[in-house]
Image: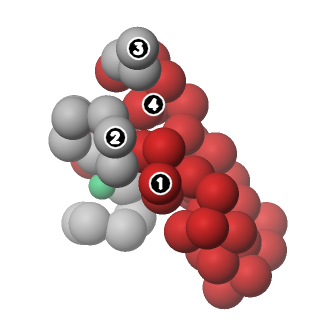
């Protein structure tokens, strides 16, 4: 049901929340995005694109 495209969108949204709201954004991302994201069996799409600040 969820694919790589959805994962990419969620990863981008989480990164955007972090950029805009810092720690508060992370809390929102963890509460809202992470549960959905965890159902998608694919690695961090931002790492794959070399854009990740969380894992690099
Ligand atoms: Zn990453």
Q: CA distance from mark 1 to mark 3?
A: 15 Å
Which residue carries the number 2 mark? 39
Location of residue 13 (image quadrant): top right
Q: Quadrant of residue 56?
A: bottom left
| Precedes in sequence: disc 2 or disc 4 | 4
The mark nearer the N terminus, 2 or 3, is 3
Query: Tags 4 and 1 in contact by the CB under 8 Å rule?
Result: no
* Quarter, ligand 1: bottom left
Q: Which mark is residue 35?
A: 1
The label number, if any, that marks residue 8 in the structure image: 4
Tag 3 residue? 1
Mark 4 vs 1, N-terminal side: 4
Say how many tags the image has. 4
Instruction: Give coordinates of residue 23: x percent, y percent.
Output: 66, 85
Residue nearest the observer in this picture, 32 or 53: 32
Left or right for 47, reference 13? left
Answer above or below: position of 1 versus 46.
Answer: above
Give the structural element (helix, strand or loop) at label 1.
helix
Which numbered disc flags the more N-terminal residue, 4 or 3? 3
Q: Is mark 2 within 8 Å of ligand 1?
A: no
Given contact means CB atoms under 8 Å apart, are the residues at marks 1 and 2 in contact? Answer: yes
Q: Earlier in the sequence, mark 1 or mark 3?
A: 3
């Amino acid at each position: 049901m969820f694919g790589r495209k959805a994962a990419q969108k969620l990863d981008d949204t989480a990164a955007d929340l972090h950029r805009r709201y810092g720690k508060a954004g992370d809390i929102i991302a963890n509460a809202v995005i992470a549960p959905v994201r965890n159902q998608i069996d694919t690695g961090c799409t931002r790492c794959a694109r070399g854009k990740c600040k969380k894992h690099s």
